[in-house]
Image (tube, grey):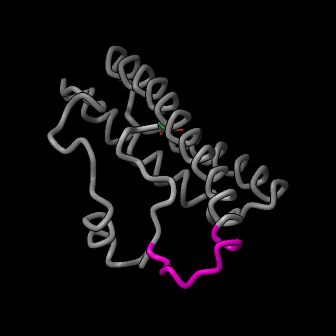
Amino acid sequence: MSADYDPHASSLDASTDPAVLDELFAIRGSIDNIDASLVYLLAERFKFTQRVGRLKAEHDLPPSDPGREAAQIERLQRLAHDAELEPAFAQKFLNFVIAEVIRHHRAIAAGEDVGPRTGTVPVVRQDAARDADGGARA
Ligand SMILES: C=C(O[C@@H]1C=C(C(=O)O)C=C[C@H]1O)C(=O)O
């Protein structure tokens, strides 16, 4: 866990029942673990997709493969349904990730470097991110 992360960070005020806070913080401990796993999983997925991007660039293949995307999205929507996750959300999430992958593939094909060690903005502050999405999460 990063040194400056406060697992009890909250905007709730002191009037909140301590027993409720105990339960909330216990649940948030599991949410923290899941979110950390998501970051590791996404990082691993992007490592693989960047290998695909290099392979495509070396062999002059197009950055996107709509047939593969459609099959994958359909499969994941079925899995989402079985897992009681909103299929439309699974589709939106996958489309979001795939759009970033294709952006990487185009950059790789253009001879640019991609990945977390490039660029100038290592961490997006939470308040800035909220402004950028028009307050959708407020
Ligand atoms: C990773 C690939 O490139 C693109 C990205 C995909 C993905 O992130 O799942 C799927 C198809 C392609 O549009 C690939 O072709 O396998």
Which residue is found at the position 40% from the left and 17% from the top?
A: 55
Residue 105 horizontal side relative to residue 77, left or right? left
Which residue is found at the position 27% from the left and 69% from the top?
A: 132
Residue 128 horizontal side relative to residue 120, left or right? right
Residue closest to the far right = 82
Residue 19 in the image, given as x and y percentages of width and height: 71, 72
Residue 62 horizontal side relative to residue 120, left or right? right
Residue 58 in the image, given as x and y percentages of width and height: 33, 14
Would you place residue 109 above or below residue 121 in this image? above
Would you place residue 35 above or below residue 25 in this image? above
- The answer to which quarter of the image holds residue 91 is bottom right
Q: Nearer the viewer, residue 35 or 93?
A: 35
Residue 69 in the image, given as x and y percentages of width and height: 57, 44
Would you place residue 80 above or below residue 132 in this image? above
Q: In the picture, which quadrant includes the C terminus?
A: bottom left
Residue closest to the far left = 120
- The answer to which quarter of the image holds residue 116 is top left
Image: magenta residue range: 11-21
Which residue is found at the position 56% from the left and 42% from the top?
A: 38
The total of numbered circles placed on residues is 0
Does the segment drawn in magenta span residue 15? yes
Residue 18 in the image, given as x and y percentages of width and height: 64, 73
Q: Main secondary structure of the magenta part?
A: loop
Q: Nearer the viewer, residue 14 or 134?
A: 14
Does the segment drawn in magenta span residue 135? no
